[in-house]
Amino acid sequence: MSSTFKLLLTTTTLLLLWSSLSSASGSPSILNHPHFAVDLNVTNFDAAFKDTPAIYAIVEFFAHWCPACRNYKPQYEKVARLFNGHNAVHPGIIFMTRVDCANKINTKLCDKFSVAYYPSLYWGTPSKFVGGEWNGKNEKSEIRLIEDGRTAERLLKWINTQIGSSYNIEDEKHENDHLLQSNVSDPVQIADAVYDVEEATSIAFDIILEHKMIKPNTRATLQHFMQLMVSHHPSKRCRKGNADMLVNFDDIYPSANRPSKKHESENNTGHGLLGKFGICGKEVPRGKWMFCRGSKNDTRGFSCGLWVLLHALTVRVEDRDSQMAFTTTCDFIHQFFICEECRQHFYNMCSRVSTPFSSAHEFVLWLWTAHNEVNKRLKNTEESLKTGDPKFPKTIWPTKHLCPTCYDKGDQNEESSSINWNHDEVFKFLSNYYGNMLVSLNKENDKEHIQIKNNAVSAQVLQSTNAFVVPVGAAVAIAVASCVFGALACFWRSRQKTQKYFHKPQPLKIV
């Protein structure tokens, strides 16, 4: 072996060793930059979009030999890191993928989407990419070409415009370990809670259907609570989903004085028919928690999301409807919350109310007091049995760092044995926290909402003793065109101002 070859071999070995050590010690390396966008090909394309829980999807069609594609990859990855992977900042929203059209096995797949240049970005719901195609035209296509996404900032701006969000390239994940020892996150995170409210609403309804809990003696309670959600749910898509279900509710679950010709209520097929609508749309549930995510898989989640939903409803109810909303909420929890001990405790708290509420102020503070009572009871149990979430132990809420003005005495905090609350400040805090700060992903445009409201047509309301019935004209309109939901929603809202609930409050009894 020549001395020159030995020298070359030794040098190469040392370079490889140095490279390995540099990577291990934290020096720049391709291994330190994980790929967030998911690489797909024709063999796993459909399956990936079937499995994703995300609401939307983006596909980048590229060619590995394309210099522009290589330069664009870091830009695409900046956006993908916000939505993809177990450490995603905003999980469950957008599934970001890429397909290499230079790979011959993907030729037909790229042809189906009429890829004319690289890189090309396509937007749509995951279901539309399954077996889907794009012909190069936007007319009547639910898959769209993103024409202005050549930098990370421009792509994210396009996304924000499309879905009414306000994501930022600099957004960071709210790690559980960085949160304060509280059962609620910092105020800026409450905006994320709308996703969990949608998740909790959908899961609650799935439980009701799965356990076939809609009976002749419970159907009216469910309708009344759904009516409450149509008017006051913080999520636009949940308001729409509830309205769609109520349009069809009496046909699927007829009242006792109007038996069904098809006997759906007798053979329980109604549960399947009603379930197909999706109380918050077909995209929910997504299988993820954000604001209500616990540090352990079996903590927080659904129970947290349900509490946020109830608080969000209370702060949106008008004064004159507070007693009706209170009775409806108590009846719903008692008849449809499947945890026996929990629902009984909640109903006992309801039963202790002896004077009807005359204002939303009273209703909001009652639920807040009830929630703190539950936290206090569970705190002792969880501490003794070691079953609580160590990062989110139960505590009296709001904490002083969230609302210092809620505490009358400056030296008090949530650990005090007896707290002097400033109830007016507590009400202001709750109204802002669960009202203004709890925003929907699909925010309503005020001008558009006013225009729809002005254009909404009046209709007669058909009503039975135990059932709420949406006008027939509205039902037909919804079936004909999706845009009429705006008119339906506004019709509901305007009707709520004069006669929001059609049932009289029943005296609460411990069953």
Image (tube, helix red, strand yellow):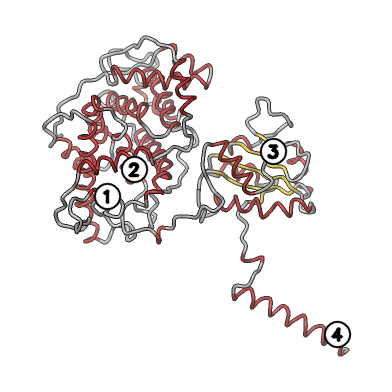
Q: Are marks 1 and 3 in contact (CB under 8 Å)?
A: no
Q: Quadrant of the N terminus?
A: bottom right
Residue nearest the viewer, comparing 140 with 399: 399
Of mark 1 and mark 4, the one earlier in the sequence is 4
Label 4, label 2: how far apart the Cα atoms are: 72 Å
Position of 193 with respect to 307 (left or right) is: right
* Label 1 residue SS: loop
Coordinates of residue 58 in the picture (x, y in percent): 63, 42
Q: Position of residue 329 (x, y in %)?
A: 26, 32
Q: Are marks 1 and 2 in contact (CB under 8 Å)?
A: yes
**Amino acid type assigned to the residue bearing label 3 in the image:** Glu
Frontmost of labels 3 and 4 is: 3
Residue 398's tag is: 1
Q: Quadrant of the image for the C terminus? A: top left
Q: Which residue is mark 2?
A: 433
1 vs 4, front mark: 1
Residue 181 vs 479, above or below: the answer is below
Of the two numbered discs 2 and 3 on the same chain, state the one appearing first in sequence.
3
Q: Marks 3/4: CA distance? A: 54 Å
Q: Which residue is mark 3?
A: 147
Residue 259 on image: x %, y % = 32, 14
Q: For residue 392, what is the image quadrant? A: bottom left
Instruction: Residue at 29%, 30% (x, y): give it.
Output: 317
Q: Please tell me whether residue 438 is drawn above or below residue 188 in the rendered image.
A: above
Q: Residue at x 35, y 26 (%)?
A: 231
Q: Mark 4 and mark 2 in contact? Answer it, CB < 8 Å.
A: no
Q: Are marks 1 and 4 in contact (CB under 8 Å)?
A: no
How many numbered badges does the structure rendering display? Answer: 4
Assign a secondary structure to mark 2.
helix
Return the disc, 4 or 2, that comes first in the chain's sequence. Answer: 4
Report the front residue among 177 and 271: 177
Q: Which residue is mark 4?
A: 5
